[in-house]
Amino acid sequence: MMKIDIGGLKRDLEELGRIGRDENGGVTRPSFSTPDLEARAWLKARIEAVGLAYRVDGAGNIFGRLEGADTAGGAATGPGSGAAGADRGAPRPPKTVMAGSHIDTVINGGIFDGALGVLAALECLRVIKESGRRLARPLEVAAFTDEEGNLVGDFLGSRAFLGRLKRDVLEKELTSYGRPLKDILKRTEFTVESILNAHYAAPELEAYLELHIEQGPVLETEDVPIGIVNNIAGKHYRWCSFTGTASHAGTTPLELRQDAFLGLADFALRSTQLVATHHYGSMVTVGKVQVKPGVFSIVPGQADFSFEFRSHSAETLKTLERVLFNMADDIAVTRGLGFSSRIVDETKPVAISPRLTEILRAECQKLGYPWLMMPSGAGHDAQILAEVADTAMIFIPSPDGISHSPKETVRWEDLEKGANLLLQALVRLAT
Ligand SMILES: [Zn+2]
């Protein structure tokens, strides 16, 4: 049985993890930043070093490809390339089996989120190539651009890969740096146009697999090395404001105030209470708050905040959208405030392909690894790709549940198991 080399994978992770080191001991490598450009060059060199060919699409997604026995060589198969009669002329090229994740990070993140899925997939392809075994289907490792959503919305790369991005959003929305996307693209070879056209070069997928750290405490608590994901939560993400009147903190009686912050406080508490009691398992979070004027002795006249909720059920997401924003309107009326909001991003919950979870379970059994079926509360590129192909995710434990932090870590023996499981699943899917 083929096995991955954990020593080599560890070296790769540590090497990539040195690119974008920040002064707080973490990694700050958002897509198209200077460290990200360096990381891209590093990854392309690594792909070539193991003897694979790389290509980059118009959205900056990087792919390394190992041809299958039945492939003539071309990766691109446009929508019109499949002849209806399989017997006549050139047969339709076999679909690609893909595995990967992302190499961008949040600000002050860790070295494993994303990078682990890309480098483990690359290690799997290296092992398969060096074994000399020629599998029927082509295999690709993928690193998708801006999974973390530092530009415009999450999953820019995988959404571009599918052709699901809107020109309007790319041209008009501001990035999290407050600058338009086209400004940030200036230092790269990419344009809004090339991002919108990226999907024309995408191969047809047989399956997409993603190995990832759990980013939560469940596997560690249960003392199980492998999580097989059966559902990825959907998310609804808005930027909201309560507006009132800024007034003097010493002279405005409590009952005459229009305190925007109190509107937010009330909403945060009541929405959390509602989700906890009526929709247990769903999440609601106020993550970023800006109070204006933000002065010591002034009653806040405005409170701007991010508001998100997540659920594994599409129906619950719909219900929450209705109920929560009605609640915000009610609170505004009661407190003499205004309330407004705009949708920043939305993703649908995704049920993972039973065909793939079955394969992962069977391979765990063969390898003798304990596993746990579990949902993912965090979003991943796999969720986007699920629209066009069977996708699955393998989790390994996150010690102390920590992620998006310099303290993010893994146990190497867990990673070895996760990567070996990925390898066996890839071989099986490509055979
Ligand atoms: Zn990630």
Image (spheres, rainbow, N blue to C red):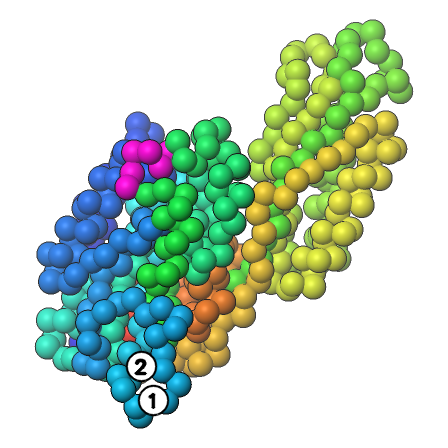
| Label at residue 86 | 1
Residue in the foreground of this view, choosing between 56 and 304: 56
Q: The N terminus lies in which quarter of the figure?
A: bottom left
Give the residue type that dot 2 points to.
Arg
Residue in the foreground of this view, choosing between 38 and 269: 38
User: Is label 1 in contact with label 2 (beta carbons under 8 Å)?
Assistant: yes
Image quadrant assignment for residue 250: top right
Q: Is residue 148 visible?
A: yes
Give the residue type that dot 1 points to.
Ala
Q: Position of residue 126 (x, y in %)?
A: 16, 66
Q: The C terminus lies in which quarter of the figure?
A: bottom left
Confirm whether the magenta stretch covers residue 186.
yes
Q: Is residue 320 left or right of residue 396?
A: right
Residue in the foreground of this view, choosing between 312 and 203: 203
Q: CB at mark 2 closer than 8 A to ligand 1?
A: no
Instruction: State the residue at coordinates (22%, 65%).
Output: 65
Q: Position of residue 267 (x, y in %)?
A: 74, 38
Instruction: State the residue at coordinates (85%, 29%).
Output: 335
Instruction: State the residue at coordinates (42%, 51%).
Output: 196
Disc 1 crowd, CA 10 A, few/some/many (<14, 14-19, 20+):
few
Q: Marks 1 and 2, Cα distance to the nearest angstrom?
A: 7 Å
